[in-house]
Image: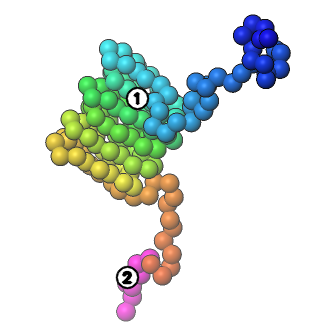
Amino acid sequence: MAIFGEKKDEKPGSVPPRKEESNVSGRVGEVHTLLGKGSEFDGKLTFEGQVRIDGRFNGQINTKDTLVVGEGAKVTAEISAGTVIVNGTIEGNVRASQTVELHQPGRVKGSIETPALSIDRGVIFEGTCKMENLGTKPSPSPATAPAAPSLTK
């Protein structure tokens, strides 16, 4: 006979595992934090995981992970991130150590520094782009460094 809904094969007082708690934060592509439509935030945002902004943000954003700027969002910020995915509007400089993706109807006004950039048809990008590996800066080896010109004869 079960007491208080316990199954016969369970020990009395044991708590069965809950399915909805298993590996919640480990799902790929899951948004950990959301600044929803109609929200406005001024300041510095530092985070781990994935953050999606659908409202307005002014300030500075720093992360090694993923920032998603949703359609209709307006971000005016200096951004340093691992990956930046843009569907809305960014005014400011973007520095990404992994990749920047600009999707329609996205708009970016400012400089982008990233080793990988994708821009969909219909995106508006006003600014400069510098593509290099931002994670490691290789020092020029003597074999590849240009020779200094000789000034004496």
Distance of mark 1 from mark 2, alpha carbons?
A: 52 Å
Check residue 149 in the rendering and tell me which mark sits there, or answer none: 2
Q: Which tag, 1 or 2, sits closer to the chain's start? A: 1
User: Circle 2 sits in a helix, a strand or a loop, which is it?
Assistant: loop
Q: How many marks?
A: 2
Q: Nearer the viewer, residue 48 or 43?
A: 48
Q: Quadrant of residue 10?
A: top right
Q: Residue at x 44, y 50 (%)?
A: 98
Q: Is residue 126 visible?
A: no
Q: Can residue 114 be seen in this view?
A: yes
Q: Nearer the viewer, residue 54 or 81?
A: 54
Magenta segment, which residues?
Answer: 145-153
- Relative height, residue 132 to residue 86 (above, below): below
Q: Quadrant of residue 126?
A: top left
Q: Which residue is drawn at 46% across and 30% down?
A: 31
Instruction: Name the residue type under label 2.
Output: Pro
Q: Main secondary structure of the magenta part?
A: loop
Q: Which residue is drawn at 36% across and 15% down?
A: 39
- Relative height, residue 120 to residue 68 (above, below): below
Quarter placement of the C terminus:
bottom left
Instruction: Name the residue type under label 1.
Output: Arg
Q: Mark 2, residues whose alpha carbon is within 10 Å: few (<14), some, or many (≥20)?
A: few
Q: Farthest residue in the top direction?
A: 4
Quarter placement of the N terminus:
top right
Q: Which colour scheme is used?
A: rainbow
Query: What x and y, as percent, mark residue 142?
Result: 50, 79
Left or right of 26, for residue 122: left
Q: Which residue is drawn at 43% across and 23% down?
A: 34
